[in-house]
Image (spheres, rainbow, N blue to C red):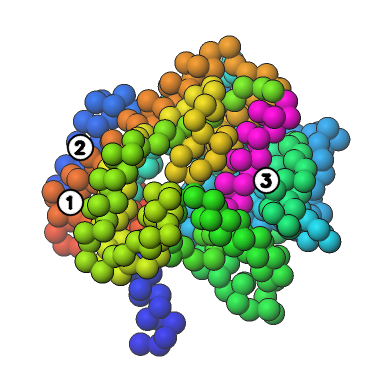
Amino acid sequence: MSNDAQAQAGTAEGQGPVEISPEVARQLQEKREELFEEFEIRDAFPGPVLSEARARTEDVHDEIRDEVDDRQDLRELTTWTTDPIDAQDFDDAISIKENEETYTLWVHIADVSHYVHPGSEMWDEAVKRGNTVYLPAYTIHMLPPTLAETVCSLVPNEDRLAHTVEMEIKKENLSFENIDIYKSVIESDERLTYSQAEKRLDDESLPLHEECALVFELADQMHEQRKEDGSLVLNPSRDRAHTIIEECMLKANKAVTHELMWGRGVEAMYRVHPQPTPDQWDKALREIMELDGVKIPSASFDDPRKAVNAALEDSPGRALNKIQRAVLKVMPRAKYMNDPFGGHHALNFDIYGHFTSPIRRLSDLINHWIVHENDVPEDLIELCDRASDRQKDAETAERLYKQFLEEVGLDPYAVNNRGIVTVDEDGTVVDEDGLPPKEE
């Protein structure tokens, strides 16, 4: 077997889908239906919602051409997306430029609120759903998939409407020199997977090498600064591509809520994460220190979050999950509120909210609308409660479905990454609905 073939065999795609019998497929369907009923998860979209989505995705190019004069035209700006190989949504893209004393970072988000707004069928349906629910090999979308597949997919070499967060970030301390949020038209140059982005960082001869290297230089500094400030980093071994996307999206989310709060004095849907009590933190840290091979440097004890970061960085790999579990057990649930009071404890941000995934989260969609209208929906408090409740229900349903997969002898991780195919006794494929989308 060649090196390439070996490498391919080690990937989810190389291993192929997980095969199940028609009987197991029936059990999985029954379990999903049971969970949908228990948690009021709406699987199928009503006809009027689908009709509206189809109508809004017709004559795409004409509509974008009509919009150009009222937006910033960023189509000449080098822009690209970075997502997992099996990603279903390409709703965020980035651009970067280095100046003498600052970096300019653009985060472009698909302009979902141009197509979905209060009074529309799709908005009402999104409020009912609250978020996209990701069960292994089965996705229940917040919005009709046709949006994510067409006008809200930032695919290469196509003009797309976007909501851009343009940030000028000081090299000296990574604070905001300037924040500008506006509607734009962009054209992505390329769609990278995470592994492709890693290759671009290593190979100077490849396109986007300089841009990827520059944005990683910024993202790496932002990541280190977050850790120094006491931001909890539960996954310390992230590769460079994931670090780029995570840090750029966190910075954009922070910029938007920073601008709404301090620049405009407008309410938003904030993400508030209460802190554990001192006793809860003590319990978690004691549990971590009792793990084999795990040490916490005494210098980090002034902040439990820094203590956890230090433990994660220096511990053997086998202890990572146990450390993460010890922390998550004592962490209160984050919720959406119209007041940022208390901030986001895990991230150690005074003000934080979601903006970068409006195709799959109600909170982000609402914040897009607030930024553009410079106003808030009358029922903002109810919408905050709704988004919080639906997220909790989605997470519980996902946990219960994964447990059920294990009960019927399936590995949820493998199913999630490779999809499912139903095969009858003589090996004939009966159904491929559970397969993740192939990379184009």
Say which of 335 and 298 sits in front. Answer: 298
Given the image, on which type of amino acid does mark 2 rest? Answer: Lys
**Whole-number angstrom distance, CA of label 1 to CA of label 3:** 39 Å
Residue type (three-letter) at the residue carrying disc 3 = His
Q: Image quadrant of residue 374?
A: top right
- For the residue marked with disc 1, what is the amino acid? Glu
Residue 401 position, x and y percent, is 24, 42
Quadrant containing the C terminus in the rendered view: bottom right
**Is 347 covered by the magenta stretch?**
no
| N-term-proximal mark, 1 vs 3 | 3
User: Which residue corresponds to mark 3?
Assistant: 108
Up/down of 121 relative to 304, above or below: above
Distance between the alpha carbons at the discs numbered 2 and 3: 38 Å
Q: Which mark is residue 406?
A: 1
The circle drawn on residue 31 is: 2
Residue 133: tell me if it is visible. Answer: yes
Residue 259 pos. (x, y %)? 69, 33
Q: Residues within 10 Å of mark 2 (few under 14, many from 20)?
A: some
The answer to the question of whether label 2 and label 1 lie on touching residues, with beta carbons closer than 8 A, is no
Give the CA separation, mark 2 to mark 1. 13 Å
Residue shown at the point (31%, 65%) measured from the top left: 295
Magenta part of the protein: which range?
Answer: 246-264
In the image, is 222 to the left or to the right of 37? Answer: right
Residue 121's x, y, as percent?
A: 53, 20
